[in-house]
């Protein structure tokens, strides 16, 4: 108590500099006692003499068990200042200590460390980990579980957990099961609440809908998200609630809340472009999108009818977003205006794709996605401005908690920022964490802690469990956890360093140089830590890595942190008064510099494609990351073998030999030398980019069109194709030869497939009514009906293609989950030919012929 009284203001400052985990750390043993060998048996039988000559109490055994005989005692076995002799050189002591380690001692040490971790609250930090594990399990199972099983599991495990409160080990075991089951139940509830009617097949209809949002694309087209009001000609029996359509142009005055109509072509949500890839129908299901497509003619405005209250509120927010984005674009202009609109209101559709790709290659695309960086800069700018304003009134500042006032204003500002920028998972997580931090400031608690991150993760998982499987959630929380853990370690280090004495006085120039150097080191450390924590997740989801991201972030982040975001906040404050022009001018110039730096580094960046990464590697690295960021004792060393195992397991994934799109139109095959052969001269760019990175290819080789006699030779298999031959195409078929010697053929119908049975190892038939004409186990056949039912396909040839059949893996395996149910209703999945609209004359002629046939039969 006396020490607290003497501390005063300096003591409070020192307490704030110490991290949360250091408050629970055991008092280290004095240096003179490090590595001491103690005869514990003798010490138990006789008292130990302290430094002041008084008889001290005998060595007491801690709660976790008696001290080992003749061992080197850790700090918790030493009762205080004791006079003991130092045995031999340190190297000899270390060797002898390692020689004395046994399995029993190792188990005891692990038990002691685990108890220490639990005392420090690691159990709560692991709650989101177990919740996420349950959600991942739900989304990974092959068939849809019912409601009863997860509910009963949650109830039963909760009762067992309460009944075993007196047995810590059993209590912890049941708690782990409870939170995993709760994650499964949360995912099941979200799946039950989400979704809606989804299109099962392509269709053209007249649609009337209410505009939810408007995105101006870089290509000049406009993308509309519509709540469907009605359909006609034909009227859809299972009408989707929301669709996303593109148009060449929209009527003047169209805004969120307007009602438009027009003839549209609607398409069902697509599945993964390859097995193991991102499932777009999964995201569409939880976004409530029942289909997408385009207007066949420009939409027209319709009179606005009654709008529900919820829709009116969403419309008001969207119109504010659009107004701010329009003002930013008009003031700054060009790509800089589009990027500024993305930073301030989350509208990213208008950024040109070359700039997007340059930022991806250089590893600075996170600047565009509103996340913790933007939230922190907004909150920090508001707090600094208010603290500076309050400093102009020293009398008021000395009597009032101005820091809390600034924290409350920052909390309000990031809430407004979240609402107008779109509630994406990264922004949602950042807002929750910053809100907890600022609330902690209001109640005089530690702000930046792992506990705050755990709270935000729990809220996100319980509210939106499907985000767990997405790259945004995984990369966002991985980077934040790594940065918070590194900050805690740095705080402990600074606290230990400051205890040795005050820093030496430096000149103004030396102080500024030191601060500039520290800022650069901080940016570099942040980039390295966050990049290392998210690198494998980026490889898993996008098959790419940014080798020059460190240099790009070192060059760009000072511009963003000191110029772009602070002046963006000032422009938002000044915008209602019409005084935002000078601030937006600075924002635009900063973004011009950022674009130039990104382009310069992108041109010099090596190829960023890394190929496929095994799921085992991702799981092992995730476990290592959790251990390294959550543990505070030497248990952190347990992360090393998991991390090494994850790195070694990265290449343990088999690369497909052929990839087939789910519509049977596009086939790709690596032919060696970093080349990827495709069967279409103008393939879908998104699909090809994904395949190229997954197959670690640099160049895409288009098909060669054959004519004359070569056409007959190709279709009969008489043309000699050396291994690695790209696609040779005729009007009805395409043929290529894999480097293994296997021949791949894509044909139009079953008749053409019969001709290829004699020479092809893989035949893809673009006909939903076709079946396997070969009946040969050594010839793999994929029909369009199979692709419609099970999604895109990956084909793996045996080392000797003539000795074993090819292995086919489809994207959708097992029973349909709720986001795949619509696949079974397409014409292709039912084995029907494409729908052909007949003219009225043809329909009348066919009806008359049918009537004549019926009359003749009656006669």
Image: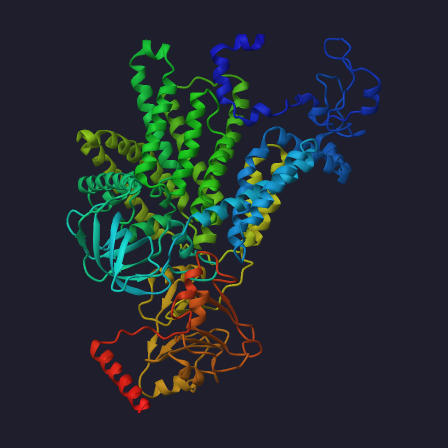
Res 378 → quadrant: top left
Task: Please identify the residue farthest to the front as the structure is shown.
Answer: 859
Q: Number of callouts in the render?
A: 0
Q: Residue 81: x percent and y percent?
A: 71, 16
Which image quarter holds the N terminus?
top right
- Answer whether residue 672 is visible to the viewer in this image: no
Colour style of the rendered protein structure: rainbow
- Answer whether residue 475 is visible to the viewer in this image: yes
Q: Residue 650: x percent and y percent?
A: 54, 54
Residue occupying the point 75% across, 37% down: 101
* Along the viewing direction, whichever of 278 and 743 lies nearer the viewer: 278
Which image quarter holds the C terminus?
bottom left
Q: Is residue 538 above or below residue 5?
A: below
Res 168 → quadrant: top right
Q: Is residue 62 left or right of residue 344?
A: right
Q: Is residue 857 above or below residue 453?
A: below
Task: Please identify the residue farthest to the left as the structure is shown.
Answer: 252
Q: Residue 344: x percent and y percent?
A: 29, 38
Q: Is residue 269 above or below residue 797?
A: above
Res 204 → quadrant: bottom left
Q: Is residue 643 above or below residue 765?
A: above
Residue occupying the point 34% across, 56% down: 240
Q: Is residue 103 left or right of residue 160?
A: right
Residue occupying the point 32% across, 35% down: 417
* Along the viewing direction, whichever of 515 and 15 lies nearer the viewer: 15
Q: Residue 94: x percent and y percent?
A: 72, 34
Residue occupying the point 50% across, 56% down: 613
* Along the viewing direction, whichever of 219 and 497 lies nearer the viewer: 219
């Amino acid at each position: 108590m006396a020490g607290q009284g003497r501390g005063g203001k300096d003591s409070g400052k020192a307490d704030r500099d110490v991290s949360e985990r250091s408050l629970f750390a055991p008092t280290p043993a004095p240096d003179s006692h490090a590595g001491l060998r103690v005869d514990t048996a003798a010490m138990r039988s006789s008292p130990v003499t302290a430094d002041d000559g008084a008889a001290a109490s005998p060595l007491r055994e801690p709660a976790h068990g008696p001290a080992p005989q003749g061992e080197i005692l850790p700090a918790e076995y030493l009762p205080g200042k004791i006079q003991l002799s130092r045995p031999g050189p340190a190297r000899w002591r270390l060797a002898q200590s390692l020689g004395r380690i046994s399995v029993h001692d190792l188990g005891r040490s692990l038990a002691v460390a685990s108890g220490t971790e639990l005392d420090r609250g690691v159990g709560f930090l692991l709650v989101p980990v177990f919740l996420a594990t349950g959600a991942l399990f739900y989304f990974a199972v092959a068939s849809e579980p019912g409601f009863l099983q997860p509910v009963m599991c949650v109830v039963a495990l909760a009762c067992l957990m309460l009944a075993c409160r007196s047995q810590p080990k059993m209590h912890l075991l049941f708690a782990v099961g409870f939170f995993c089951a709760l994650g499964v139940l949360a995912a099941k509830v979200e799946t039950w609440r989400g979704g809606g009617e989804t299109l099962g097949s392509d269709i053209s209809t007249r649609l009337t809908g209410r505009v939810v949002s408007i995105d101006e694309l870089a290509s000049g087209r406009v993308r509309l998200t519509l709540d469907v009001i009605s359909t006609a000609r034909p009227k859809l029996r299972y009408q989707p609630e929301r669709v996303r359509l593109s148009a060449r142009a929209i009527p003047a005055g169209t805004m969120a809340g307007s009602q438009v109509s027009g003839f549209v072509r609607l398409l069902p949500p697509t599945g993964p472009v390859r097995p193991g890839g991102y499932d777009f129908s999964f995201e569409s299901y939880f976004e409530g999108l029942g289909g997408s497509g385009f207007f066949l003619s420009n939409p027209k405005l319709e009179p606005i009818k009654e709008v529900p209250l919820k829709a009116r509120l969403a419309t008001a927010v969207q119109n504010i977003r659009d107004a701010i984005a329009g003002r930013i674009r008009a003031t700054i202009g060009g790509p800089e205006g589009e990027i500024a609109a993305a930073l301030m209101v989350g509208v990213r559709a208008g950024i040109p794709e070359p700039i997007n790709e340059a930022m991806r290659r250089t590893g600075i695309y996170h600047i565009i996605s509103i996340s913790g960086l933007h939230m922190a800069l907004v909150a920090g700018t508001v707090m600094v401005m208010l603290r500076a304003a309050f400093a102009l009134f020293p009398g008021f500042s000395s009597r009032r908690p101005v820091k809390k006032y600034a924290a409350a204003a920052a909390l309000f500002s990031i809430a407004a920022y979240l609402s107008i920028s779109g509630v994406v998972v990264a922004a949602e997580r950042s807002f929750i964490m910053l809100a907890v931090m600022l609330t902690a400031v209001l109640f005089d608690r530690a702000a930046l802690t792992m506990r705050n991150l755990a709270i935000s993760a729990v809220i996100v998982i319980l509210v939106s469990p499907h985000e767990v499987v997405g790259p945004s959630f995984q990369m966002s929380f991985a980077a934040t956890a790594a940065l918070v853990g590194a900050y805690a370690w740095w705080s402990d280090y600074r606290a230990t360093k400051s205890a040795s004495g005050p820093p030496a006085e430096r000149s103004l120039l030396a102080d500024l140089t030191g601060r500039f150097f520290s800022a650069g080191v901080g940016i570099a450390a942040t980039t390295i830590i966050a990049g290392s924590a998210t690198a494998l997740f980026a490889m898993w989801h996008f098959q790419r890595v940014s080798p020059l991201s460190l240099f790009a972030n070192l060059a760009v982040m000072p511009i963003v942190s000191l110029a772009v975001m602070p002046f963006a906040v000032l422009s938002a404050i000044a915008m209602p008064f019409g005084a935002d022009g000078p601030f937006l001018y600075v924002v635009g110039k900063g973004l011009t510099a950022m674009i130039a730096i990104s382009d310069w580094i992108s041109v010099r960046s090596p190829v960023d494609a890394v190929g496929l990464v095994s799921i085992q590697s991702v799981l092992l690295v995730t476990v290592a990351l959790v251990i390294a960021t959550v543990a505070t004792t030497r248990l952190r060393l347990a992360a090393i073998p998991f991390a090494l195992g994850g790195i070694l397991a990265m290449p343990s994934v088999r690369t497909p030999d052929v990839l087939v799109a789910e519509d049977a139109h596009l086939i790709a095959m690596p032919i060696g030398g970093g080349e990827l052969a495709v069967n279409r001269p103008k393939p879908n760019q998104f699909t090809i980019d994904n395949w190229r990175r997954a197959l670690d290819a640099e160049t895409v080789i288009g098909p060669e069109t054959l004519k004359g006699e070569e056409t007959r030779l190709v279709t009969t298999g008489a043309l000699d194709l050396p291994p690695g031959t790209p696609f040779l195409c005729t009007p009805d078929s395409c043929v290529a030869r894999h480097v293994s010697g296997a021949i791949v053929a894509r044909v139009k119908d079953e008749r053409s497939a019969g001709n290829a049975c004699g020479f092809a190892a893989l035949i893809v038939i673009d006909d939903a009514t076709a079946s396997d004409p070969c009946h040969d186990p050594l010839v793999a056949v994929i029909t369009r009906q199979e692709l419609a039912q099970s999604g895109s396909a990956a084909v793996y040839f045996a080392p000797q293609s003539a000795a074993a059949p090819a292995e086919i893996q489809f994207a959708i395996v097992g029973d349909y989950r709720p986001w795949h149910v619509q696949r079974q209703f397409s014409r292709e999945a039912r084995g029907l030919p494409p729908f052909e609209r007949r003219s009225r004359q043809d329909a009348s002629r066919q009806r008359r012929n049918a009537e004549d046939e019926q009359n003749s039969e009656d006669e």
